[in-house]
Amino acid sequence: PQPVLLKDYAPPPYLIDRVELDVDVREPWATVHARLAVRRNPGSKDTGRTLVLDGEHIELLSVAIDGRALAASEYKVDAQNLRLESVPDAFTLETRVRFDPWKNTRLEGFYATKDGLFTQCEAQGFRCITYFVDRPDVMAKYLVTLHADKERFPRLLANGNLVASGDEEGARHWARWEDPFPKPCYLYAMVAAKLDLLEGSFTTRSGKNALLQVYVEPGKVDQAGFTLHALKKAMQWDESVFGLELDLDRFMIVAVGDFNMGAMENKGLNIFNTKYVLARPDTATDMDYYLIDRVVAHEYFHNWTGNRVTCRDWFQLSLKEGLTVFRDQEYGADEYSRAVARIQDVRKLREVQFAEDAGPMAHPVRPDTYVEINNFYTPTVYDKGAEVVRMIHTIIGKAAFRRGMDLYFERHDGQAVTCDDFVRAMEDAAKVDLTQFRRWYSQSGTPVVACRGEYDATAQKYTLTVKQSCPPTAGQPEKLPFHIPMAVGLVAADGADMALRLEGEPRAQGTNRVLDVREAEQRFVFVDVPSMPVPSLLRGFSAPVVLRSDWSDADLTHLMAYDSDAFNRWEAGDVLATRIILAGVKAIQAGNVPEIPAAYIDAIGRVLVNAARDPAFAAECLALPAESFLAEQMDVADPDAIHVMRKRVIRILATRYRTRFEGAFRHFSVPGAYSPDAGAAGRRALRNAALAYLMELDDSTARALTFLEYRRAENMTDTMAALQCLANSSGAERERALGMFFEKWKDEALVVDKWFRVQATSELAGAIDRVQALLKHPAFTLANPNRARSLLFAFARANPVHFHAADGSGYRFVAEQVVALDALNPQIASGLARSFDRWKKYDAARQGHARAALESIRTRDALSNDVREVVDRALA
Ligand code: HT7
Ligand code: ZN
């Protein structure tokens, strides 16, 4: 297939203002009768009279224009399109199509699961339901009537308001829904299913009372309460922070167990993966609760950033996704701990997005080309996109950002717009020039910012020299300098922040400054600096860059102890730990015994002593950098040495602080009824981090303690923490705990996913054999994305030492699974294929195995475009 190019964008020659759908469900068919009000687009330069509609995996039964049925000679239909020549300027187009949702394993369009039928239309699933101009700049009002068997499908839902319903012949029923808002077809949704319902209500600040509904599979209403609670919190937050109110009388969330992504923001009818809806203290961990909170908020926030103002084309995806991730990050920061939320978000960005930016799938936040749009729902578009919005917030400040949002809605409500329209609203509201800043949207790659500080005691000046560069990325050999907001402070020897005055300024302006770095090399001279400071750079991770600085180990332990910026206190420890592990890897490679500086061991001791001040923060400080992140820091990654060295550091700390870890494990218990709030979750995080350190000793005392904890645990957070430790241990407790767990939870799909995951990520020898055996487990199926993720993605992404096995067995195994998955669900298969992205980072022997594995995928016939694009780019 030909790549789609941003530069080829042209407005659609025809618009569709109104859509009436009549959907009849009778197994094996769904039959869809569509009536579309079509008119020529006055904004299009195309003067042709051909209407091209998209349609895939559907069988055309009839076509009519203004009530006249067309003969087969009057239209052309192929596997992708329906073409109508010489159409009038305005007309009603009627089509009838049918397809089999029970055979739809791709899970896009309209598909069947055990509980009923559900839709997923973003990005291009609507064309699998009816013939349509399937692009987001075609917006229409919808009236939808659904018909189905009443007993099998008691719930018939679509976007908007229920306007009529009734029974019909043959024990069937129908329901008609009208959505008052024009929308792009990717926001279309319908459901015909047997589901239980939890209801609530929300009164908006202008006094409108809205009905809130959460639909879940039968018998699971007791796991839906937190989602309803989270939805109300999100509504409240968007009103108070952005002044944005719910515009609907009814807001529905439907949970489905078979779903390709996390959730979908269809107007008024959000469809969610069960993973982001169902939670009970004994089935869901603190992290599950936190993610549910964030995802519910994210989808709700899309109602304005995505639905009311949508994307002109799919190159603009970050317009809605980057902005909405920024909004859900801020919501998380306000609802939980700002510092811990930031640490976790940055950790993920650096582990996943930075690797993407350095690999074959690197693309700008606003890509300029794609083959398969589903491959571009990426960490770059989402998470780097959110960082780009955050930088605008940092540059112009909170008040101007809010003005910019208001202006954006004032100008563009009801429109399909571009990233540039968003930036222009921010520029106009803040009266700043973001011309250079726009490069963040068009240039791929992670900039490297190198800082060097020089102190002149006589002149009492501190000069910070900042150099930026950006490595070449696919299709972009050269980059222009970025506009980088760099938040900085200067920390004195006594730990206090110094007042900051730049040369030329009349007076000091606070102790925390945002420097505008715009040049390839720039100097910032601070005056009135009474003593040699330690610079605290990029506070709060104010830009998505790799920071290099000439800090000594002592500088870093000083920042760990005193930096007033909590993120940078954590960051200093992370930089130091990375430095120590990478030095240890070199020592191991040279056959030497690695050393761990006493200053670092002492600093971790202080983290433990002070843990009670903020247990969640302390738990983050105890978590060493991930193996995948460490691999990215090496020229040639050595997964075995990284694994050995990282574990060595943990074991040395565990040995040295055994008593403190045991004390923390006892002390930070959380009495009373379970609550997922930040305080309680933070205590559990610290307690379980302590347990993991102790279990690294893998002696009989630690194993007995962990097994006892496993049996006594009263919530899933503590259960999983203990089980994860046991899964990595060779003792007999491992099999006992895993057996007990499965027996207890075999009927709870999301908990069974955890059981697969904990085994797939086990570092014990023989991982591939165990994962291969689990593939044959009766509870395993490739057809369910959550299950495939829990075993295959977990192995390929979170078990680096076995995925990168030196004999290539990990690569061969994953390649075979990519091929098997591709036959069912190309989107999920291409996600798994992306596990090979960084294959060129490894040694020649591993590269040979990875290349062979990738070639073995590429040579298969009938490979999807999704997988082909990923594999072609990896091998290029
Ligand atoms: N906007 C939603 C994206 C999405 C999606 C995309 C492709 C295939 C399946 C999908 N399910 C959901 C989710 C979001 O970002 O809010
Ligand atoms: Zn989103």
Image (cartoon, rainbow, N blue to C red):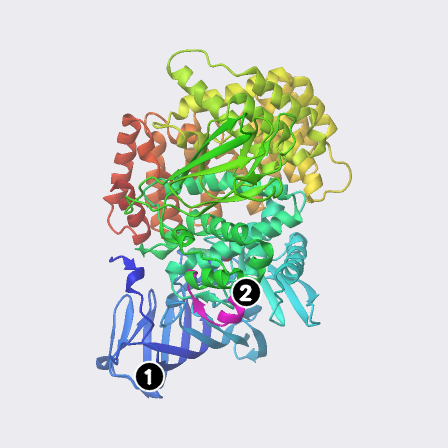
Sort mark 1 into few (<14), some (14-19) or many (20+) by Cα contacts within 10 Å: some
Tag 2 residue:
304
**Where is residue 811 shown, x and y percent of the image?**
34, 34
444 lies above or below 237: above
The secondary element bearing badge 1 is classed as strand
Which image quarter is the C terminus in? top left
Tag 1 residue:
64
Which image quarter is the N terminus in? bottom left
Towards the viewer: 362 or 76: 362
Towards the viewer: 69 or 802: 802
In the image, what residue type sits under mark 1? Answer: Ala
Sort mark 2 into few (<14), some (14-19) or many (20+) by Cα contacts within 10 Å: many
User: Hey, which quadrant is residue 17 in on the image?
Assistant: bottom left
Towards the viewer: 750 or 301: 301
88 lies above or below 131: below
Q: Is residue 652 left or right of residue 701?
A: left
**Where is residue 733 shown, x and y percent of the image?**
59, 24
Query: Disc 1 vs disc 2: which is toward the camera?
Result: 2
549 lies above or below 257: above
Towards the viewer: 107 or 219: 107
Q: Is residue 714 left or right of residue 844?
A: right
* Res 108 visible: no
Report the magenta residues as a range: 406-419
CB-based contact (under 8 Å), mark 1 and mark 2: no
